């Protein structure tokens, strides 16, 4: 008897904001197939949305068509996501000063909170750039929904 396949999603997105909702729906479906808790699925969507949004907003100086490739795998020891793109090089995992999170709103500055959340939710990560292409791999913890069964064979891959 073989082990159940790893629940996985592979998706190619255009560099357009409306693609984020398509990605979010695919992640929700993956979370359901893999038996992830709603909290794990929400955190995964939060990380992906933040990274993709920043890439779309700051990574492409031209109006040309670009592709972002997203892979998410639900593994025994957590969730692994990989994003590949040809945007401007930028390491979202690099050390930066933490944003002010205190109650004094006059001390808060725009920007930085989303990437702070990404770094907090990532258990580990790696960023590399070569030949005009970026590759970001993030590993996150996962929680399985109580009473969820193991993934079913044949329901492991997402649509592209």
Image (cartoon, grey):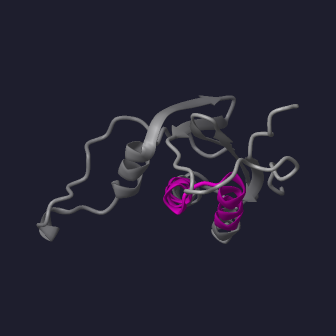
Judge from the rendering whether residue 101 lies leftward or rightward of residue 148; answer left or right: left
Q: Is residue 30 magenta?
A: yes
Tell me if residue 23 comes above or below residue 115 in the rendering.
Answer: below
Where does the magenta region start and end?
24-50
Which of the 4 image quarters holds residue 83?
Answer: top right
What is the quadrant of the C terminus in the image? bottom right
Q: Is residue 98 magenta?
A: no
Q: Main secondary structure of the magenta part?
A: helix
Residue 87 percent location from the top left of the image:
62, 46
Judge from the rendering whether residue 10 lies leftward or rightward of residue 132; answer left or right: right
Residue 107 percent location from the top left of the image:
14, 62
Residue 146 percent location from the top left of the image:
55, 56
Residue at the image point whose x is 53% and y is 52% from the top: 51
* In the foreground, 99 or 64: 99
* In the foreground, 32 or 47: 32
* In the foreground, 72 or 63: 72
* In the foreground, 55 or 42: 42
Residue 101 percent location from the top left of the image:
21, 58
The mark tally for this picture is 0
Residue at the image point whose x is 55% and y is 54% from the top: 44
Residue at the image point whose x is 13% and y is 66% from the top: 103
Tell me if residue 111 comes above or below residue 85 in the rendering.
Answer: below
Which of the 4 image quarters holds residue 38?
Answer: bottom right
Judge from the rendering whether residue 34 lies leftward or rightward of residue 103; answer left or right: right
What is the quadrant of the N terminus in the image? top right
């Amino acid at each position: 008897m073989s082990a159940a396949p790893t629940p996985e999603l592979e998706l190619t997105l255009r560099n357009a904001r409306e693609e984020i909702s398509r990605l979010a729906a695919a992640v929700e479906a993956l979370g359901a197939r893999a038996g992830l808790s709603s909290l794990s699925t929400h955190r995964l969507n939060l990380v992906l949305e933040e990274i993709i949004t920043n890439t779309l907003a700051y990574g492409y100086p031209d109006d040309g068509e670009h592709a972002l490739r997203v892979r998410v795998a639900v593994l025994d020891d957590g969730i692994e996501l990989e994003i590949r793109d040809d945007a401007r090089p930028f390491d979202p995992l690099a050390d930066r000063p933490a944003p002010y999170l205190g109650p004094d709103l006059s001390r808060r500055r725009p920007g930085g909170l989303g990437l702070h959340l990404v770094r907090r939710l990532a258990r580990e990560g790696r960023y590399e750039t070569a030949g005009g292409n970026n590759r970001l791999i993030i590993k996150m913890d996962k929680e399985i929904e109580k009473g969820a069964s193991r993934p079913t064979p044949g329901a492991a891959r997402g649509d592209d």
